[in-house]
Amino acid sequence: MRVKRDLTSAPGGPVALTIGNFDGVHRGHQAMLARLIEAAEDLRLPPTVLTFEPHPREFFAPATAPARLSTLRSKLELFRAYGVAMTFVARFDARLASLTAGEFVTDILERRLETRWLLVGEDFRFGRGRMGDLAFLRQVTRSFSVEAMRTVAIDGERASSTAVRNALSAGDLARAAALLGRNYTITGHVAHGDKLGRSLGFPTANIPLRRVPPLTGIFAVRVHGLRNAPRVGVASVGVRPTIKAGGRPVAEVFLFDFNETIYGERITLAFLHKLRDEARYPDLESLTRQIGRDVIDAREYFAAHE
């Protein structure tokens, strides 16, 4: 898959296009990508995605923007896995936000991206003040056809990034997995920590988190990216309130029956079951006892489910 980091590079010819933030690439997004691939094959055009970085809500209201479900890299990897040929990552800034709906159609979709077929959600809004919608697209465009993607419902609930966040926040990992079509994951590079876990008898692999995660707590996880087979363990996601006040979010995982140096390696934590919420303990001794119980609970989960 070709990735173009701005809108100044021409696609090299007409494209079949879909537009969206695609946060989490949930089952609604997957249905859009499948329809994009199908139409692109029929039209003999490259299936292309236009997405944005940062998320528009992070640009307009960073303090209240929702937690991200996926990093840009993870999102691009999923696009590639589903068969997308080209992705444009448009920097969402003041210039892009100031475009009217008409300018967005003329300058971006027609002139720069050479769109010949476009797929958008039924509630798609675009342009300054969100004045553009599906009806506007169909009214003004002359160079491409427009198709609307109907809502995808999972067990009666609309598949959406908001629904996934709500499920994760509530600790309902099974519901989140149903909406995503896979277990929720966090991917990152293992970094050096303060080595506290090792001194407590539970050495952990630490993944610093750049943003506030959509879930917190203690979890049974499966870890991918190490050697030839997945490993299992228990992970903590949060700010470690017993260790320090005002700490930054971190994901740390204690891998069962594993004792190798993995600093710098990129691993993926797949969240299978929530054991408990994050809590503050009066001292390290109390924390150590609780970690021991968490390990037992996680091992019992895997014994019962694997």
Image (spheres, rainbow, N blue to C red):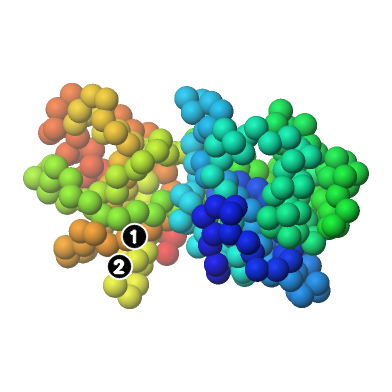
Residue positioned 33% across, 75% down in the render: 228
Q: Residue at x 34, y 72 (%)?
A: 229
Q: How many labels does the image show?
A: 2
Q: Which of 27 and 110 is in front in this view?
A: 110
Is residue 272 depicted above or below 79 in this figure? above
Residue 201 showing in the rendered view: no
Determine crowd level at label 1: few under 14, some 14-19, many 20+ residues with C-alpha closer than 10 A: some
Q: Quadrant of the C terminus?
A: bottom left
| Residue linked to disc 2 | 226
Residue 193 lies in what quarter of the image? top left
Q: Is mark 2 on a helix, strand or loop?
A: loop
The spot of residue 301 in percent (x, y) is 38, 54
Q: Where is residue 117 in the image (x, y as percent from the top left)?
A: 80, 60
Residue 18 in picture, x, y percent from top left: 71, 55
User: Which residue lies under the disc numbered 1?
Assistant: 267
| Pointer 1 or 2: first along the chain | 2
From the viewer's perspective, tell me whether residue 14 is left or right of residue 87. right
Q: What residue type is labelled 2?
A: Leu
- Dot 1 and dot 2 residues touching (CB under 8 Å): yes
